[in-house]
């Protein structure tokens, strides 16, 4: 048994070590009691893989940069050799949970989310040091190719047991070519209602260490067409209008980019959800699959792509049969 959590808790005078459910990554989380009172979250990062980004150091660097503008959990202390970090405990209420309990507040929170989106597109992009690691990595061809291959491996081959249609392969290649030169804005990279926390009525952002350059509408597509949440049309309008106004571009250009990003982002998410469900047996990701497919269906409808509409309906039927409880 790994004794590292207990060792760090002892060295840092932390008590009542309680394991918490983690995210899709390999970080481990524990709720602990601090010696000065109150609780905190102990995060343990895995060893850095050769030739891979250092998520631990990336978190520290981005936290320092983002803090003046975004609301983030405080860092109480950290230990680089042990790859351990003690963070402010934001509680267990994500934006998803808060909206489920208080649906009447949806438009108010949509406006708060839109303001945070605007921060990433405008001041956080404009003020970023050009040589910083998060401004030197972007959604380029290798990144898009990897995410599409991941989707094909885990959603199509792993869950549906079939290959994607050839027309979709060609379409995704065209979308990637269209999006690559538009990666000029700092994006959170995983901006959804489970990575936004509600703590003392504050909207707090977590899991931002993978931030990189992306098209301006990348994070907008992530939250508007969220696999974990269905926003009302009024809320979607609030989310989209602030970024549209901020960018100052034409409506056709705005929706042209957003539709492409939404398809790319949702197919990538399908790969993640299917991997967690099939490979890791994490059934809590199952409801996100049909929801994401419904998003994709609406994207194809907006694009008047008849073959995409028909095919997505078929995938939805297959998935719904899979998840249907036995008689």
Image: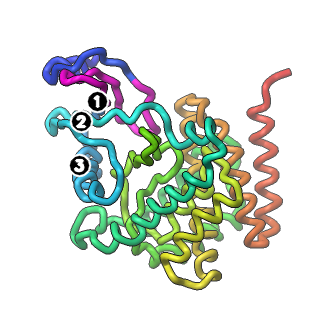
Q: Secondary structure at mark 2?
A: strand
Q: Residue furthest bottom?
A: 250
Number of numbered callouts drawn: 3
Judging by the rendered image, the residue that carries numbered circle 1 is: 42
Residue at the image point whose x is 40% and y is 49% from the top = 205
Quadrant occupied by the C terminus? top right
Q: 72 left or right of 250?
A: left
Residue at the image point whose x is 53% and y is 51% from the top = 150
Q: Earlier in the sequence, mark 3 or mark 2?
A: 3
Closest to the observer, 149 or 100: 100
Residue 163 in the image, given as x and y percentages of width and height: 68, 52
- Tell me the distance, in whole angstroms, between the alpha carbons under discs 1 and 2: 6 Å
Residue at the image point whose x is 47% and y is 71% from the top = 215
Q: Earlier in the sequence, mark 3 or mark 1?
A: 1
- Tell me the distance, in whole angstroms, between the alpha carbons under discs 3 and 2: 9 Å
Residue 294 in the image, given as x and y percentages of width and height: 73, 52
Judging by the rendered image, the residue that carries numbered circle 2 is: 85
Span of residues in magenta? 20-42
Callout 2 crowding tier (Cα within 10 Å): few <14, some 14–19, many ≥20: many
Residue 152 seen: no
Q: Secondary structure at mark 3?
A: helix
Callout 1 crowding tier (Cα within 10 Å): few <14, some 14–19, many ≥20: many
Q: Which mark is residue 60?
A: 3
Closest to the observer, 192 or 279: 192
**1 and 2 marks in contact (CB < 8 Å):** yes
**3 and 2 marks in contact (CB < 8 Å):** yes
């Amino acid at each position: 048994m790994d004794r590292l959590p207990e060792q760090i808790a002892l060295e840092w005078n932390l008590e009542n070590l309680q394991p918490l459910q983690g995210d899709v990554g390999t970080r481990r989380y524990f709720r602990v009691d601090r010696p000065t009172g109150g609780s905190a979250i102990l995060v343990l990062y895995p060893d850095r893989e050769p030739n891979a980004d250092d998520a631990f150091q990336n978190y520290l660097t981005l936290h320092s940069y983002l803090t003046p503008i975004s609301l983030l959990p405080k860092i109480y202390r950290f230990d680089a050799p042990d790859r351990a970090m003690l963070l402010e405990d934001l509680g267990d209420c994500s934006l998803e949970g808060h909206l489920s309990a208080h649906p009447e507040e949806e438009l108010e929170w949509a406006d708060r989310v839109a303001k945070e989106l605007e921060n990433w597109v405008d001041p956080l992009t404009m003020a970023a040091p050009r040589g910083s690691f998060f401004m030197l990595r972007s959604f380029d061809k290798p990144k898009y190719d990897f995410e599409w291959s991941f989707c094909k491996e885990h959603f199509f081959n792993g869950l549906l047991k079939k290959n994607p249609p050839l027309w979709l392969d060609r379409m995704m290649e065209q979308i990637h070519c269209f999006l690559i030169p538009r990666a000029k804005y700092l994006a959170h990279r995983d901006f959804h209602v489970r990575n936004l926390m509600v703590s003392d009525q504050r909207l707090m952002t977590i899991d931002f260490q993978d931030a990189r350059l992306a098209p301006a509408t990348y994070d907008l597509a992530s939250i508007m067409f969220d696999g974990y949440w269905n926003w009302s049309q009024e809320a979607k309008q609030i989310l989209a209008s602030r970024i549209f106004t901020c960018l100052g571009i034409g409506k056709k250009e705005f929706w042209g980019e957003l539709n492409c990003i939404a398809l790319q982002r949702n197919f990538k998410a399908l790969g993640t959800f299917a991997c967690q469900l099939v490979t890791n047996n994490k059934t809590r990701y199952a409801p996100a699959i049909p929801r994401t497919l419904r998003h994709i269906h609406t994207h194809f409808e907006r694009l008047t792509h008849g073959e995409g509409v028909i095919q997505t309906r078929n995938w939805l039927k297959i998935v719904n049969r899979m998840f249907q409880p036995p008689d």
